[in-house]
Amino acid sequence: MQYDYRRIVFSTRPHDLCVYEAVPGVLSLASNVSYIPGFSFASHLVPLQMTGAETGLLCSFLVTKSIAGCPPPKFHVAGSEPGSDRVWLNYQSPLFTAQMMISGIQTDRLEIRCSWSYFQLLRNRLEILYPPGVFATDVLTAWLLTKGFCPIHSGAVTIDGNGIVITGPASVGKTTTVLNLLRELPNARVMSDDIVVTDGLSIFGCPMTASAEYDFPELGIRAFRPWHHFALKLSPLLLPFLANHIAPLCLQLPKDKLAWKAPVQYLFFLERGEPRTERLEAEDALRQLLLINRLEFSYQRDLLLVAYSWAHPDFPIWELMNQETQILSSLIQRAKCFKVSSPAPDGFWKKITEIIK
């Protein structure tokens, strides 16, 4: 069936606590809001039962009026204490207050709390201060790495049950390629258009991402209305305020066109240029994947994680980076890796189809 997504409103206003399958089979997310701007794993929270599979990891993202007893900062605007499994952000100015408290980084239950004014008002970077969803993405990335999982900045489909990972720099054409493969190959299923998670053996979809900011009428996918496009042309900074009008693919596609877990078979790197394909050795593929990933996931330079690592020498960030390298290396050893070049986003899927066939 195809859901009537127009009836679902994504809101930043706190409401009843709900639990969502952010990464089916891996991670559940409990939240009292349904739209988290800047949160890469699940910006649009959909109250759908996707797999019913139990997950061992639970992350809570809670918006509260304020955070009582939030300590003063110790490291720039952040702080942490030895022996306490928490880190906080406390930014004060005459016009604006931003507070965030994160606990459980070294447990299986991660809790992120942020003040309502910070969550509602700050959706673009302000000096060293990022929107709450960006900090949440970094901390959750680090937390997943400690559990043996690594996110990848990529789209992904399955073909006959085998995973096809499609990665590349931002705006190169990953979503367009995913949707073209879905349209052209009857046995294709979508896992995600922007992020997948891997344990080095399999890939897991993140169905509640919503990076498609354009229409794809061939599949019945709708994005912004004309007035949204006009507003964004005037000011691209309005994007996080308007993106709650976008429905993620898991709402706009029939459920039999979605997949949640698969063994990896191919890894494609997209780049703009003259049409060509090139088989990549494992070492080159790993280097390129790490560069793409660390542009998207900035946990290694995140203010809160630096403050936490400062107070907890047993939580060094460089070990997280080594863990990321090991997990991605294990994945690449199981995949056939190719670089695919095309002058336009619509050209990638044809080359990929030729290689797969």
Image (cartoon, rainbow, N blue to C red):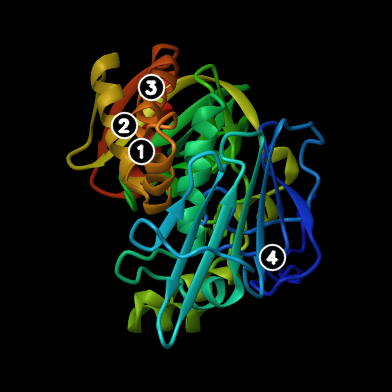
Where does the image place residue 323, in percent across and percent down from the top left? 41, 23
Tell me, for residue 293, which label it has, or none.
1
Of the image marks 3 and 4, the number of the one nearer the N terminus: 4
State left or right for residue 186 relative to residue 16: left
Q: Which of 53 and 61 is in front in this view?
A: 61
Where does the image place residue 28, in percent across and percent down from the top left? 70, 42
Instruction: Please say if 290 is above or below 120.
Output: above
Spatial CA distance of label 4 from label 2 is: 32 Å
For the residue marked with disc 2, what is the amino acid? Answer: Leu
- Which residue in the protein does label 3 denote? 355
Q: Residues within 10 Å of mark 2 (few under 14, many from 20)?
A: some
- Which residue in the protein does label 4 denote? 33
For the residue marked with disc 1, what is the amino acid? Answer: Asn
For the residue marked with disc 3, what is the amino acid? Answer: Ile
Where does the image place residue 112, in percent across and percent down from the top left? 60, 54
**What residue appears at the point 23 percent right and 47 percent down from the top-left corner?**
343
Looking at the figure, which quarter contains the C terminus?
top left
Is residue 213 among the parts visible in the rendering? no
Q: Residues within 10 Å of mark 4 (few under 14, many from 20)?
A: many
**What residue appears at the point 44 percent right and 21 percent down from the top-left corner?**
327
Spatial CA distance of label 2 from label 1 is: 5 Å
Name the secondary structure under disc 4: loop
Name the secondary structure under disc 1: helix
- Which residue in the protein does label 2 denote? 290
Of the image marks 2 and 3, the number of the one nearer the N terminus: 2
Q: Which residue lies furthest to the top in this view?
A: 333
Is residue 176 among the parts visible in the rendering? yes
Q: Badges 2 and 1: C-beta atoms under 8 Å apart?
A: yes
Q: Badges 3 and 1: C-beta atoms under 8 Å apart?
A: no
Of the image marks 4 and 2, the number of the one nearer the N terminus: 4
Q: Nearer the viewer, residue 269 or 137?
A: 137
